[in-house]
Image: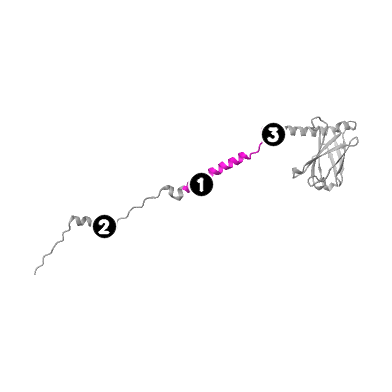
Amino acid sequence: MTFSKVKAVSSPLANRDRDMLYMQTHSTTPTEPRRWYKQFWPWFLIALPTAVVIASISTLIISVKHADKLVAKDYYKEGLAINRYLAQDRRAEELNLQAFGNIDDRGNLTLTVNSGDDSQTPATLGQQLKLRWQHPTDSARDFTTVLIREDRNRYAAHIKPTANTDPLGGRWYLTLEDFTTAKGSAQWRLKSQYRPERSGQIDFRAGDPL
């Protein structure tokens, strides 16, 4: 018996179905890229300069709000004050003023003031003198004592010691001034220091540095 070879013939429809099945099983769908605003790094890069700008604006606002209120008028007033102080120092040297005194443990202060011309001393000094006490580290403790004339050139005052105004409690800068002008501005001044180790002794000399 003889068998004949049969050649399989595929139809076009079968080929199409097979191709479609192959594409469905082997093909992959491409992934859609993420939007930029959904990613971390763009926002990170935007945040850096934004933070710098916000910090700069905040610093500017703070500096403007808390700026020193110094104007030209203040500098002018300070210049006038410096000139006035220098004139007072020169006047004290011209009069050759000297003062010495003592303060006891009860706060009683006596001060004797002399000038180069004793005959003019009473007129030069006046009835009252002003003694300024300046603390070297705490300006809130500064105070002023008014001395009243008791004799020709002798003055006295009482200082009531408190927590802030205890002249025996440390070192102080002293300024002695007159009260002779109508506006209350001194014509002369003497500078000195009070030191507790000097046992209450106070002395002033025109032209002496502190």
Q: Which residues are magenta?
A: 43-71
The kind of residue tagged 2 is Tyr
Under circle 2, the secondary element is helix
Q: CA distance from mark 3 to mark 1?
A: 42 Å
Magenta stretch contains residue 46 = yes
Q: Is residue 107 above or below residue 24?
A: above
Q: Amino acid at mark 3?
A: Asp
CB-based contact (under 8 Å), mark 3 and mark 1: no
Element type at mark 1: helix
Which residue sits at x=74%, y=33%? 81
Q: Which residue is mark 3?
A: 74
What residue is shown with label 2? 22
Indicate which disc residue 63 carries.
none
Pointer 1 residue: 48
For the residue pair 96 and 22, the one nearer the viewer reads as: 22
The quadrant of the picture occupied by the N terminus is bottom left
